[in-house]
């Protein structure tokens, strides 16, 4: 019997339909994407990760689902790009989404999971595995497309063009699902939600901005995985990617038809008042002056893109020297096709590494309250763990982020050793130095060794209890076993050994009676609850050349926040009766940590704490100020800080406490 | 009760405390003597907010109060913009509040000018959006119930735009907006004034306009003359709109929501794709894939913990999601109208002191001000100069987060720190029209009107000279008795109003 093919080749627009009607870009715009061969694919298409359901509620109709296994389509790489054939739309969203998922899985070295469905039945919290992300290509009649965390679905809109200019024909319809960038962007929102469900809660001006920026970064760098696109653009810019080019832009058609110039966003520059494109200069003050999430996000994207350009320039300097006999000045006219190809290869390689670094870093972020500075620390630490010896990329990232004024709070240098998140060992040393101000170094080493051994024992026995699993097995099975780990980790943290409290402090958790009364508590012991968000594997390269898998564990604690500081004080006053479970406060304040553990040696490799613990009143105040609009003019005329959109009003399920293992479980 | 008096020089500003909304009565001495020149700026409130004030008096009492203070004669009435909390004290269906008043002259922003093409297009668009919004509200209510928070949120926005407090009237107002409280109020003022000296529609940057009978001149800073006012992504004006019978017009959100509202079922013959691609709901239920993944609703099963969620789970359907687009529209409208606020700087003739009334101008309006410059004889007058001379600031939009720009004197856009500089600093005073206790009962997170940080900045800058509808000015410790007494000597605090006199010297 013959083997099934490895991949399925499908046709898509490289950018969007607007490029198909310009001679210069038409040929480059039709692209073949290789997606993994899914033997069990159904019509829809519906595979292991994606299900496309083409329901158009505003029109009250469904569109017939495409059958990618139809021999006619198999023989010609799917349907040819077409705006008027909804089945091509289905094919394109499937193909681009799968491509994005593959990039993600490759960088993280594990299968992707969508966020769990969380819900409450009779006061009991439940969670279910969601196998497929649903995509509705024609869900809205709006200049909009979004990921709905409540429905685990992407909703794409369409709208008629009302402008008339060189790019716009009034009366034609723009389908957001036909923009490669918009699809990649929205899928990334969903993928990030699968890793960090709490990043949906904007608690500072960076959280939403980060979601947007990260999705833009993935969409942007995906351009570089298509050789025909890069070569076209390298030719046009004569190898200088710092001039205006399509690679640095997102959603051209959407941008042009909604009056935003040549694209929706551009990581490199923008049109000035006269419609002339100008590069954007790194501005270290920009973040202080910007509050709107997309605009803030654009700063992060610009910083990452700049890092890529610096690397590309340094990596291609030799090629330019060779091509110009050392003068660095290219002769007029087109560059040599060989040079085009070589430059394209370099660009593709740099872009791929940058993208992988950006994706890998999401395992190295705090579970809540992320800031751009935290993300930089994540990028640096992840890269240190993955390729310690090659520091070129890290250095460039630090340089670019510094030039854009992105830096973590409370670090004393921008060197990679200060930026790296602390290891378990470092924290134990600090803790010991705090507990024993005067001590010989032998005593110290001895004590730390003892602590580590105790910790290890506790973990070892827990880890043993778990059956082996591997990434090849069914995703639901993997999900079930990972879920089981959560309980083990939870019990280890809560029960611990005689040093229980010490670990918690090490990890920035508060599990003793010192927590303020507004912190959520366990019904069982009346002590502060600890919630294990997720346990997931991540890869690390080891010296010998192979790769190891660490476990990433996210832990948070919850506290009731009140918009009125006086009420907060009153609720936090010592009282003999604990707060009722039904008392939810005005908002939730969360704090916690992400821990990376090597399961084989039980070593705590990294600890990533939020800035304060759940007891920290200053941090609570920061969140309050953000939510009430005190920390900057965001929102709209109607809502300050956090715009309470209908979408969020209607995702009640997600407003419910996220408590896989929160303490009322009573034996779940 | 006696008439309100004007000072011998300068102006007395009476800020009414009718509720969460604006109503200002200004009395200037008349050139050549006689009764004061009375100027009224806005008259409205958010229904319900008055109950949070000690007097709990209805708006009618305030209108009566104004009538007695002015002998029902207003020399000038200014309406900053067409929002409920600025105009709903002007008209009502039976015995309109201001029916018995004489209004000599009225001022509006250029956006009200019936002879201005851009203004007409903006208004038309506003009406169009109102209809769409209402249709969407009705569809949502049908699907989710009248009391659903989504429906309530849209209603709250609708009531601001129409001036109507209850749903039946909102419906009527959206269908025929010319009958809404807001529009009727505007019309009443216009018709009264046009029988006398007339109506002026003011353009920013135009020659300063004199208040008749006084030497006081008003500089117009906003709203900017620009189609961007509605902050819509769509261009307005000369650019192409789809032709009226254009097929694509049927593909809009508005078309879908209104068609559905009219017939109570979606218009299935309007879709961007050919019929051969389409399946009706019924056909879809027969289709093996769609039946498995979408149509068969699972309600009771599939809720066990730690399981795989069923393929056809009903929580993943999107029957109503598309209607949420109404919200974006509503917020855009709301901000758009706030930004049509008429922004006026009144200049006292001798001292050249400025009284700045910004309506509910938000960021878009503020940042446009610097486009204006004026000639005063040989001298250029800039916005920076006007703001520096400001001694009284009517705070924008109840002191909310984006209606008073913060910044520094070095910044290139107009902001709070451009105001009250030099000799004006010692006198700089502000007025916030807000009932905080009421506002925090609205929305989630609540409306912080005023925003704490803005109130704090104002109190600092004004050295305590801040009037807020629900709060009397409080003397800060560090302010000297002499300076506070001087301020008090020009102030009159009543439970119904604050009165504050600015001397023209």
Image (cartoon, coloured by chain):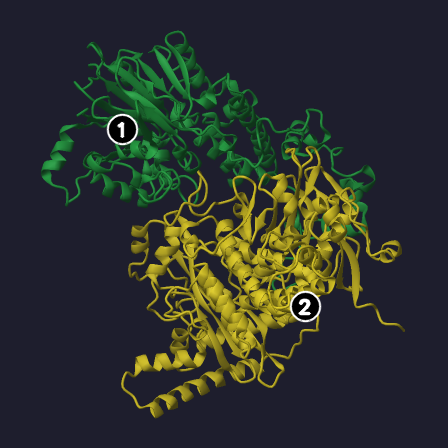
Q: Residue at x 47, y 62 (%)?
A: A401
Classify 10 Å Cα crowding around label 1: few (below 14), some (14-19), many (20 and above). Answer: many
Which quarter of the rendering shows the C terminus of chain B?
Answer: top left
Secondary structure beneath dot 2 equals helix
Identity of the residue drawn at 77% across and 53% down: A44
Task: State which chain disc 2 sits on.
Answer: A
Colour chain A appears in:
yellow
What SS does tag 1 mark?
strand
Name the mark on residue B354. Answer: 1
Residue A6: image x %, image y %? 79, 68
Front-most of residues B289 and A44: A44
The foreground one among B325 and B408 is B408
Left or right of B369 in this view: A552: right
Q: CA distance from mark 2 to mark 1?
A: 70 Å
| Residue A571 placement (x, y as % from top left) | 32, 55
* Residue A591 in sight in this render: yes
For the point 28% across and 37% down, which residue is it?
Answer: B419
Rendering coords of residue A598 (x, y %):
54, 80
Q: Chain of mark 1?
A: B
Residue lying farthest right? Answer: A1
Residue on which disc 2 sits: A475
Q: Quadrant of residue B202?
A: top left
Residue nearer the viewer, A613 or A204: A204
Left or right? Give the position of A172 relative to A580.
right
Foreground disc of the pair 2, 1: 1
Give the color of chain B as drawn: green
**Mark linked to residue B114:** none
Left or right of A640 in this view: B482: left
């Amino acid at each position: 019997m013959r083997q099934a093919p490895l991949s399925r080749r499908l046709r898509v627009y490289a950018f969007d339909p607007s490029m198909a009607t310009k001679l210069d870009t038409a040929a480059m715009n039709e692209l073949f994407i290789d997606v993994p061969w899914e033997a069990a694919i159904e019509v829809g298409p519906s595979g292991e990760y994606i299900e496309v359901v083409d329901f158009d509620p505003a029109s009250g109709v469904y569109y017939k689902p495409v059958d990618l296994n139809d021999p006619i389509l198999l023989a010609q790489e799917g349907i040819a790009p077409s705006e008027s054939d909804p089945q091509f739309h289905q094919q394109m969203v499937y193909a681009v989404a799968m491509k994005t998922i593959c990039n993600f899985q490759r960088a993280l070295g594990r299968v992707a999971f969508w966020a769990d469905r969380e819900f409450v039945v009779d006061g009991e919290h439940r969670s279910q595995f969601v196998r497929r992300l649903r995509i509705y290509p024609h869900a809205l009649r709006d200049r909009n497309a979004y990921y709905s965390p409540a429905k685990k679905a992407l909703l794409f809109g369409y709208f008629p063009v009302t402008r008339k200019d060189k790019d716009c024909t009034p009366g034609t319809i723009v389908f957001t699902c036909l923009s490669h960038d918009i699809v990649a962007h929205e899928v990334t929102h969903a993928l990030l939600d699968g890793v960090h469900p709490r990043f949906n809660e904007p608690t500072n001006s960076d959280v939403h901005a980060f979601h947007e920026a990260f999705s833009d970064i993935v969409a942007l760098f995906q351009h570089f995985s298509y050789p025909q696109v890069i070569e076209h653009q390298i030719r046009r810019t004569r190898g200088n990617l710092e001039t205006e080019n399509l690679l640095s832009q997102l959603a051209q058609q959407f941008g042009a038809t909604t009056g935003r110039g040549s694209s929706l966003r551009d990581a490199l520059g923008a049109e000035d008042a006269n419609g002339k494109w100008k590069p954007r200069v790194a501005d270290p003050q920009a973040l202080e002056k910007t509050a709107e999430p997309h605009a803030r996000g654009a700063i992060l994207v610009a910083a990452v893109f700049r890092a890529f350009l610096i690397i590309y320039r340094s990596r291609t300097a030799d090629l330019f020297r060779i091509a110009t006999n050392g003068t660095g000045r290219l002769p007029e006219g087109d560059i040599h096709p060989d040079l085009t190809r070589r430059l394209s290869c370099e660009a593709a390689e740099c872009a791929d590494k940058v993208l992988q670094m950006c994706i890998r870093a999401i395992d190295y972020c705090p579970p809540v309250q992320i800031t751009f500075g935290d993300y930089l620390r994540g990028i640096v630490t992840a890269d240190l763990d993955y390729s310690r010896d090659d520091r070129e990329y890290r250095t460039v990232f630090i340089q670019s982020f510094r030039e854009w004024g992105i830096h973590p709070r409370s670090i004393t240098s921008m060197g990679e050793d200060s930026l790296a998140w602390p290891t378990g060992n470092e924290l134990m040393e600090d803790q010991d130095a705090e507990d024993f101000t005067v001590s010989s170094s032998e005593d110290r080493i001895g004590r730390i060794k003892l602590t580590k051994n105790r910790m290890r024992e506790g973990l070892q026995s827990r880890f043993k209890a778990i059956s082996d699993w591997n990434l090849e097995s069914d995703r639901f099975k993997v999900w079930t076993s990972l879920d089981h780990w959560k309980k083990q980790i939870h019990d280890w943290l809560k029960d611990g050994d005689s040093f229980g409290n010490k670990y918690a402090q090490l990890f920035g958790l508060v599990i003793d009676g010192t927590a303020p009364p507004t912190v959520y508590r366990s019904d069982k012991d009346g002590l502060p609850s600890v919630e294990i968000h997720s346990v997931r594997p991540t890869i690390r390269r080891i010296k010998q050349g192979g790769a190891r898998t660490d476990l990433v564990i996210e832990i948070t604690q919850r506290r009731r926040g009140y918009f009125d500081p006086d009420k907060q004080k009153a609720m936090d006053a010592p009282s003999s009766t604990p707060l009722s479970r039904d008392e939810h406060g005005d908002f939730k304040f969360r704090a916690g940590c992400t821990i990376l553990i090597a399961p084989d040696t039980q070593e705590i490799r990294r600890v990533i704490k939020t800035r304060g613990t759940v007891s920290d009143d200053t941090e609570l105040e920061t969140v309050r100020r953000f939510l009430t609009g005190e920390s900057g003019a965001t929102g709209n005329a109607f809502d300050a800080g956090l715009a309470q959109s209908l979408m969020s009003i209607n995702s009640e399920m997600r407003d419910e406490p996220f408590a896989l293992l929160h303490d009322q479980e009573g034996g779940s | 009760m006696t008439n309100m008096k004007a000072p011998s020089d300068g102006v007395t500003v009476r800020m009414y405390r009718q509720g969460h909304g604006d109503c200002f009565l200004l009395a200037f001495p008349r050139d050549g003597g006689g009764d004061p020149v009375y100027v009224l700026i806005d008259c409205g409130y958010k229904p319900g907010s008055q109950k949070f004030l000690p007097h709990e008096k209805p708006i009618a009492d305030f209108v009566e109060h104004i009538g007695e203070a002015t002998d029902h004669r207003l020399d000038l009435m200014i309406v900053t913009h067409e929002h409920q909390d600025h105009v709903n004290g002007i008209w009502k269906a039976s015995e309109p509040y201001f029916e018995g008043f004489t209004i000599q002259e009225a001022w509006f922003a250029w956006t009200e000018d019936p002879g201005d093409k851009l203004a007409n297009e903006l208004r038309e668009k506003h009406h169009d959006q109102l209809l769409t919004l209402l249709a969407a509200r009705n569809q949502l209510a049908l699907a989710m119930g009248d009391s659903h928070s989504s429906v309530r949120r849209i209603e709250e926005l609708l009531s601001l735009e129409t001036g109507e407090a209850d749903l039946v009237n909102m419906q009527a107002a959206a269908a025929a907006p010319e009958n809404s409280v807001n529009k009727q109020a505007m019309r009443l003022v216009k018709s009264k004034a046009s029988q006398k000296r007339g109506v002026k529609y003011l353009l920013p940057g135009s020659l300063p306009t004199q208040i008749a009978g006084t030497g006081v001149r008003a500089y117009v800073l906003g709203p900017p003359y620009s189609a961007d006012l509605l902050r819509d992504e769509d261009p307005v004006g000369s650019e192409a709109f789809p032709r009226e019978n254009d097929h694509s017009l049927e593909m809009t959100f508005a078309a879908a929501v209104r068609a559905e509202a009219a017939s109570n079922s979606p218009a299935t013959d309007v879709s961007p794709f050919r019929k051969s691609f389409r399946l009706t709901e019924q056909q879809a239920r027969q289709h093996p894939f769609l039946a498995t993944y979408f149509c068969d609703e699972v309600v009771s099963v599939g809720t066990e913990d730690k399981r795989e969620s069923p393929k056809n789970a009903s929580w993943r359907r999107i029957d109503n999601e598309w209607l949420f687009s109404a919200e974006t529209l509503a917020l855009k409208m709301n901000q758009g109208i706030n930004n049509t606020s008429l922004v006026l700087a009144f200049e006292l003739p001798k001292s050249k002191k400025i009284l700045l009334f910004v309506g509910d101008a938000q960021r878009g309006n503020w940042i446009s001000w610097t486009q204006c410059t004026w000639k005063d004889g040989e001298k250029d007058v800039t916005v920076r100069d006007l703001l520096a001379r400001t001694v009284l600031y009517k705070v924008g939009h109840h002191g909310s987060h984006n209606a008073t720009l913060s910044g520094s004197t070095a910044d290139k856009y107009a902001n709070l720190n451009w105001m009250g500089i030099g000799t004006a600093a010692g006198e700089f005073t502000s007025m916030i029209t807000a009932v905080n206790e009421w506002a925090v009962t609205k929305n989630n997170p609540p409306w912080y009107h005023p925003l704490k940080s803005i109130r704090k900045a104002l109190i600092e800058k004004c050295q305590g000279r801040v009037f807020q509808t629900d709060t009397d000015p409080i003397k800060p410790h560090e302010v000297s008795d002499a300076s506070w007494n001087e301020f008090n000597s020009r102030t009159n605090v009543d439970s119904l109003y604050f009165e504050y006199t600015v001397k023209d010297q």
